[in-house]
Image: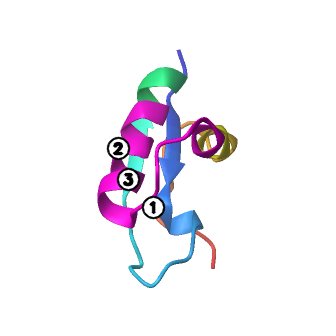
Amino acid sequence: MERLYIDCREFPSDMKCTVAIAADSERELVDAAVQHAVAVHGHHDTPEFRSEIRKAIHKGNPPASVAA
């Protein structure tokens, strides 16, 4: 099974969040990413937002840095 990840560094913000979240399943990753987005970034947990989160999923492990 390949790891999946979402990296906040890909989404510019005033906060300059550097959190990357990885998991073995899409469901677990989306749940964790949504929890982070709600608690830290003030987003709302909606079906539409979860759909957007799914579009940001990558296979593998987060890179050490993200291209600017």
Figure coloring: rainbow
Q: Which residue is mark 2?
A: 35
| 52 magenta-colored | no
Dot 3, how many residues are within 10 Å of its Cα: few (below 14), some (14-19), or many (20+)?
A: few
Q: x, y (%) of residue 41?
A: 39, 65
Q: Is residue 55 left or right of residue 9?
A: right
Foreground mark, 1 or 2, reads 2
Q: Which residue is mark 3?
A: 38
Taking depth in this image into account, of 1 and 54 the one nearest to the observer is: 54
Q: Point out which mark residue 21 bears.
A: none
Of marks 1 and 3, which one's residue comes earlier in the chain?
3
Q: Identify the amino acid type marked 1.
A: Ala
Label 3: element kind: helix
> How far from the left and from the top, in percent, is residue 16?
42, 78
Q: Nearer the viewer, residue 26 or 1?
A: 26
Q: Disc 1 versus disc 2: distance between alpha carbons?
A: 23 Å
Q: Quadrant of the C terminus?
A: bottom right
Residues shaded magenta = 30-50
Q: Is residue 29 above or below residue 67?
A: above
